[in-house]
Amino acid sequence: MTQNKILGALAAIVGEKNVLASESGVAPYLTDWRKQFSGPAVCVVRPGSTAEVAGVVRQCAQAGVALVPQGGNTGLCGGSVPTGARPEIVLSLSRMNRIRELDALNNTVTAEAGCVLAEVQRAAGEAGRLFALSLAAEGSCQIGGNLSTNAGGVNVLRYGNARDQVLGLEAVLPDGRVWNGLRGLRKDNTGYDLKQLFIGAEGTLGVITAAVLKLHPKPSASATAWIEVENPQRAVELLSHLRNACGDRLTAFELLSRSCVDAVLAHRPRIRDPLPGTAWAVLVQLGDSGSDDALHALLEHALGSSAAPNAVIAKNDAEAKALWSIRETVPEAQFSNVKHDISVPVSKVPQFIERAGAKLAAAYPQAPIFCFGHVGDGNLHFNVGDAALLARRDEVSRLVYEIVDALGGSISAEHGLGQLKREEITHHKPPIELELMRAVKRALDPQGLMNPGKVV
Ligand code: FAD
Ligand code: ZN
């Protein structure tokens, strides 16, 4: 089929104005958030309903043209943009942004894939409920992208990953058929849990079009604290202490190295350092029913009986926001360097930081290390050097990943594989696991049309 014929056929499905083919029309969809990956597209197509997605996918399957699903394009592994290896069409889900249903008594919301995460949080909040997924990109990332990357974020400690928020799913298969699995059931043991195949698949097995998501009681009280810790070992001990003292009220436990705080202060001079001069800090969040006062008292009591004397507890929402803004500014404050998104068992976090830090210091004595993230989940963002070191990315990462492997960790804790780590993962996963992944891919997408060049 010629290019013009494909464009015409797609326009017949979604309307002419929703097929973008001009250079300026497609440009915003071709480059990833970090500006590290970019590739050409035949066009960008913007369906407005599941039926339209199905029509587009069927059309592409018939023409043998590959598809790249795209949500908010905030992914950090180059999964949402074309590779340029073959003709590809970007399938933007942005127009599919309806909340189809919110069932407060079932504690579920049914949202379309293009709903921006913050909008789903808002809808849940208005109904007196909490949608627990939360990450710094929540103002632009979309539910379809969140599920396709199995996003993590700052509430995983209490509520789990994106995967744990899903009860039901609707997806368009690579041949254009629609699978409606939009069940809002908390118990359903009727064979393989197919929705979990699509979650975390980064668009390689089909297009997620909607999901039934779990809601939780909305906490009425919160407490936020910035706490000095002498070193990562003390941080992990404090985590254990706070979990014992506060139970499930502890929702976030984030570690920040001095280098991260300094980078934030340099990047945003108006931000204030809550505890100047400390080598390491943790940012802690508690949530509960009841009153702020009671929760603050619990946190103060827990900290009083810990070995962490130096802490700032936010007195109000504005102070809490100011503390969180430090954590949320870290990604942009050290934008260009060699990034790692690793996990190890929580108890081995201090060992990882020490061993990887020592190896890097020996090999690249001038390179700063920005170590921060979700210690409560054993997940660290461990970024090295500056833009100049990017030319040596592979050798830097090899040093880091050797330690990750030795400690039984993962080279991608929350951002996925995309194109960035597609080759690298083959050195870390057992061959039988890779073989099973490829078998699943072949079974669902025998033509290899869904997001080629990503994941497997
Ligand atoms: P996109 O980037 O558009 O796509 C991501 C992948 O999913 C691609 O492979 C794409 O093809 C596929 N995809 C998208 N929509 C669909 C669909 N409907 N069906 C099938 N496949 C689809 N991530 C975390 O996990 N935790 C964090 O704390 C976190 N913080 C971040 C902070 C910042 C400042 C930024 C920029 C990113 C952060 N991320 C984080 C990464 C990113 O926000 C997440 O991966 C997010 O889930 C991606 O959503 P998106 O809608 O932008 O997806
Ligand atoms: Zn993160």
Image: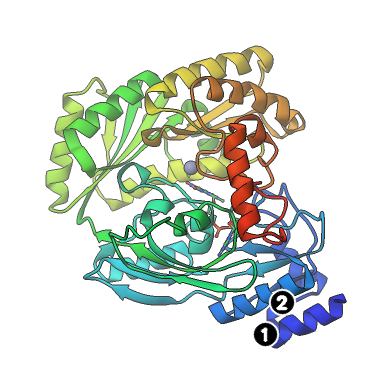
Q: Which residue has dot 1 on it?
A: 13
Name the kind of residue labelled 2 in the image.
Answer: Gln
- Residue found 70% across the figure and 38% down from its top: 423
Q: Residue 59 carries which label?
A: 2
- Residue found 66% across the figure and 15% down from its top: 365
**Please, is residue 429 above or below residue 115 in the view?**
above
Give left or right: position of 406 versus 232: right
Q: Where is residue 121? Give x, y as percent.
A: 37, 63
Foreground of the two, 352 or 110: 110
The image quarter in which residue 63 lies: bottom right
Report the mark closest to the observer, 1 or 2.
2
Name the kind of residue labelled 1 in the image.
Answer: Ile
Give left or right: position of 85 versus 51: right
Q: Which mark is residue 99?
A: none
Q: Are the residues at dot 1 and dot 2 in contact (C-beta closer than 8 Å)?
A: yes
The image quarter in which residue 299 lies: top left
- Residue found 38% across the figure and 28% down from its top: 346
